[in-house]
Amino acid sequence: MSPMTPARVTGTPGRTRVLIVGGGITGLAAAHRLRDLLGPDAEIIVAEQAMRLGGKIHTVDFAGRPVETGAESLLAARPEAIALAEAVGLGDALVYPSDAKPALSIGGELLDFPAGHMMGIPGDPADVAAIANAKERPDNGLPILEAGGDISVGALVRSRLGDEVLDRLVAPMLGGVYAGDVDRLSVRAVMPQLAAALERHARLTDAVNEIKRPASEAPRTPVFATVDGGLERLVTATSATARAEVRLGMTVRELRQTPYGWEVIAGPVPDPIKITADAVILAVPASPAAVLLRAVEPQAAAALSGVAYASVALAAFAFDKVDLPERSGFLTPASEGKTVKAATFASKKWPHLGRRRQIVRVSMGRLGEEALLQYDDATLAKTALRELGEHLGQRLPEPVEQRIDRWGGALPQYAPGHVARVAAAREALAAHPNIAIAGAAVDGVGIAACIASGQKAATTIAEQLTHSH
């Protein structure tokens, strides 16, 4: 064989083979669902460029405790992540946060986050009077959004409730989730329930009140959860249960449709391999997905290549003795002029971590602040520690342990029209059998959203393969 001819990896005759590109939780959830649907004989390959699985989920030993360096928790308010944890044998390991509430850091004070809001948008302007001057503007009696229409979160809130509600409440909430610019985030992608309600209401507060959780004396189900021992246990257990063939350090470089299915060129440039498969699921960020799709379906590639990403840096500190307020952490508006945009008092928020040492995670970086990630670890840690002390109104002691983690291009930004563009991309891809796209690039950030996206892609592929066979 010539050195330039890729070695071919072909499937076993009579056995279905699916290649999943991307070994984050999206790809692993897809593999797990495929194993359920296609049975024990299917060949499922997970190709992951990095030398570990999990993507933005990465647990490390820090100050003697399992601490997350990326995604911190599961959204328990929607079912997919909890159900997957239970399905892979981690139901008994699920743990929930304490009753400690987050604060807003404004003007050197930690203020209670007002009740009765949705992602910072109040159902009643009076609820947020202590923090922001909110007065609902007159409306024209017509629904705020046309059916299927979209608008940026910034334009919506600013035009209806004013700048202070946007800057002091909504932007910090969304900044904590997306590290994004509220004027470039789609309401329909970021808050789909609200977008649907906006098609029925002329007043923003009426739309918020329609979907806001009703007040009740009954104990609420916790919004978040995590896994005792770290979220990486979910990655490991899902991978093991899926019984997929995992290939780490494998970069998929080209994707081609053939008369018999799909073919990819993968691996190092000097010594690539060619893998054939009946179906392919792309569970990677927007840019690599767009590159792979360019020769297959240009419309889908164009939709993905337009997705921008924000970068963040996370600092973790462990203290032997420090006086932290009884809160889960805080968010702060960009108008406060701080590098630190949020902090989690992990030992206060998660009782299972214990309180022998106090662990604090600090988040830095918003869209457009990528230069921040170029500072060395010592500079970032020093900045984070100093600003954390300013937010808390005290000079903090030297931590007994600290670490910096950078997540370049970690958080997709859903510009207005994102949902419609993704729908059009999927419609165009439907002309090509047995290929699907999934993950945060298309269907939402957060572990639960990624799991749902991977499972949906797997279900679609399994149905197509079953039908074609």
Image: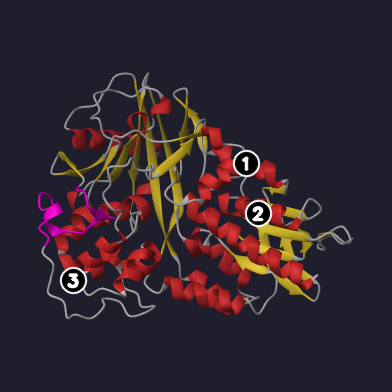
Q: Is residue 186 visible?
A: no
Q: Quick one: SS at disc 3?
A: helix
Q: Which residues are magenta?
A: 114-134
- Quarter residue 149 falls in: bottom left
What is the quadrant of the N terminus in the image?
A: bottom right
Contact check, label 3 and label 2, Cβ < 8 Å: no
* Color style of the picture: secondary structure
Q: Residues within 10 Å of mark 2 (few under 14, many from 20)?
A: many
Q: Is residue 266 left or right of residue 234?
A: right
Amino acid at the residue labelled 1: Val
Which residue is label 2 attached to?
33
Q: Position of residue 439 (x, y in %)?
A: 54, 59
Which residue is label 3 attached to?
159
113 or 200: which is nearer to us? 200
Q: Is residue 139 placed above or below 25 in the rendered structure?
A: below
23 or 335: which is nearer to us? 23
Which residue is label 1 attached to?
88
Amino acid at the residue labelled 3: Ser
- Earlier-in-chain disc, 3 versus 1: 1
